[in-house]
Image (cartoon, grey):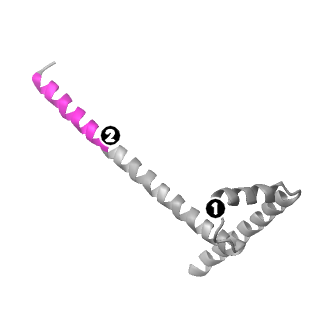
Amino acid sequence: MTERDTKRLERISEKLEHIKAQRQDILARDRKRQRKERTRRLIQIGAVTEKYLNRKDMNPITYENFWKNLFSVEGVQAKVEHVMAHTESQEKKNSNAQGASES
């Protein structure tokens, strides 16, 4: 291999390492964004749940036991799934209607 080829390979290797570092930076930024979105969503859900349960003093263990006990009641799981499906259907209709009105 000639000296020119060796230098060219070195430059290509450096570029490759640079591209790999850029890729890792992009992936890290995306993971950070996803974590922030999840944290925000969890905080919002917790706030709404606290509002409707009217229990500002509930600790996480009590809260988990509440949901565990609620879902152990016969028929509750099916009812929740039904309500969630209905809610998602309504949200989809509303977003479709909103999209159509913006056109």
Residue shown at 75%/60% (left/top)? 66
Residue 2 in the image: x percent, y percent?
12, 20
Give whichever of 92, 67 is nearer the camera. Answer: 67
Tell me whether the residue at label 2 lies in contact with that at label 1, contact meaning CB atoms closer than 8 angstroms: no
Crowd around label 1: few <14 · some 14–19 · many ≥20 (10 Å): few
Amino acid at the residue labelled 1: Asn
Q: Quadrant of the C terminus?
A: bottom right
Residue 22 in the image: x percent, y percent?
31, 46
In the picture, residue 74 is in which quadrant? Answer: bottom right
Q: Is residue 11 above or below residue 46?
A: above
Q: Which residues are magenta?
A: 3-21
Which residue corresponds to mark 1? 59
Which residue corresponds to mark 2? 20
Count of labels shown?
2
In the displayed structure, does residue 24 sit left or right of residue 50?
Answer: left
Residue shown at 47%/59% (left/top)? 36
Q: Outermost residue, top direction?
A: 1
Q: Is residue 92 magenta?
A: no
Residue shown at 66%/56% (left/top)? 61
Q: Quadrant of the N terminus?
A: top left
In the displayed structure, does residue 68 sit left or right of residue 27?
Answer: right
Residue shown at 22%/36% (left/top)? 14
Give whichever of 39, 99 is nearer the camera. Answer: 39
Q: Is residue 20 magenta?
A: yes
In the displayed structure, does residue 54 sit left or right of residue 102?
Answer: right
Q: Outermost residue, bottom direction?
A: 101
Q: Is residue 56 above or below residue 15?
A: below
Residue 96 in the image: x percent, y percent?
65, 72
